[in-house]
Image (cartoon, rainbow, N blue to C red):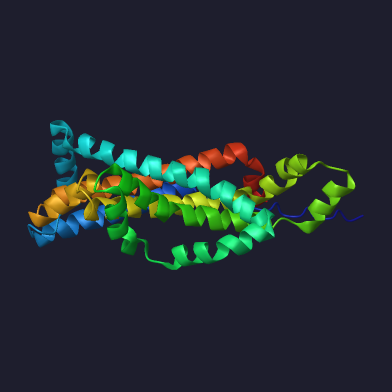
Amino acid sequence: MRVAAAAPAQRRVPTRPRMTPAAIRWLSVAVGLGAWEAYGRLLGSPIFTYPSAIARAAVALVQTGELQFYLQASLVVLSLGLLLAVAAGIPLGVAVARWPLLEHVTDPYISALYATPTVALIPILVLWLGFQTQAKVALVFLFCVFPILINTYQGVRSVDRRLLEVARAFCSTEWATWRDVILPSALPFILAGIRLAIGRGLVGMVVAEFYTSITGLGYMIVQYANTFRTDRLFVPIVVLMGMGVGLTGLLKRLERRIAPWMHVLREE
């Protein structure tokens, strides 16, 4: 009687630990900053700066209080303009998508204003509102409101008709249909519009500070560009980058709280 030979045990290949996405991002940033630092020191030009010089300039501006003073002025303009854009863009986008008559009435104005370069409206805003905060807030509002409005409109119009038919079949009220079907379906579009509005709002804030009364971070950029202080020039630019990344990250956290099903679908 022959005994069958035992099958050789399969060798387990040791798996290498995989880097997390966050680690990859931080490593990429570190490599980029290191290359910038090495090239800047090698070049030795007073005009071309590098990260360590920018960090020293940032510390000096913080110690004198200059950075905090101008940053506060910019944050007021950005916050007011963005909040007004959200408060006006979402209800108007919902209303335009809900009532065809309102869509036909407002479509020429929305299309014309959206297609017009917002910078071209600065002289008119200055004539109407002056050089103070009102004109800056109005300009940031115009930069931000159209991405929110258009994305909200598209989100409401893109709701699955079968879901609406099911809601009607169960005799759902108008408010319940909006609460349980339309708004949850449109929420990804609305959040995408707000995310786009954040970037456009930062651009509008700086442009407003360039062309109206020169204050805020825009004043710092103009001042240090005229005096060729590139190390200090990059400080407000880096702050603007940080504001964009921070606000976008905050919006993602909010998105996880109010729309957790979006992330479940992405993970699947």
Front-most of residues 96 and 79: 96
Which residue of the protein is positioned furthest toward the front in this rendering? 128
Residue 213 seen from this side:
yes
Front-most of residues 43 and 146: 146
Q: Where is residue 21 in the image (x, y as percent from the top left)?
A: 48, 49
Q: In this view, does 112 lie above or below 97?
A: below
Q: Where is residue 252 in the image (x, y as percent from the top left)?
A: 51, 43
Residue 157 is drawn in which quadrant? bottom right
Front-most of residues 35 and 185: 185
Q: Tell me the residue at 43%/45% (across/down).
A: 82
Q: Tell me the residue at 8%/59% (across/down).
A: 44
Residue 65 is drawn in which quadrant? top left
Query: Could you tell whether 198 is left or right of 261 in the image?
Result: left
Image quadrant occupied by the N terminus: bottom right
Front-most of residues 195 and 128: 128
Residue 13 seen from this side:
no
Q: Is residue 44 above or below residue 16?
A: below
Q: Where is residue 185 in the image (x, y as percent from the top left)?
A: 68, 50
Query: Could you tell whether 127 is left or right of 104 in the image?
Result: left
Count of marks, rendered view: 0
Q: Tell me the residue at 75%/57% (across/down).
A: 160
Query: Could you tell whether 157 is left or right of 86 in the image?
Result: right
Q: Tell me the residue at 74%/46% (across/down).
A: 181
Residue 76 is drawn in which quadrant? top left
Which residue of the protein is positioned furthest toward the right in this rendering? 1
Q: Where is residue 78 in the image (x, y as percent from the top left)?
A: 36, 44
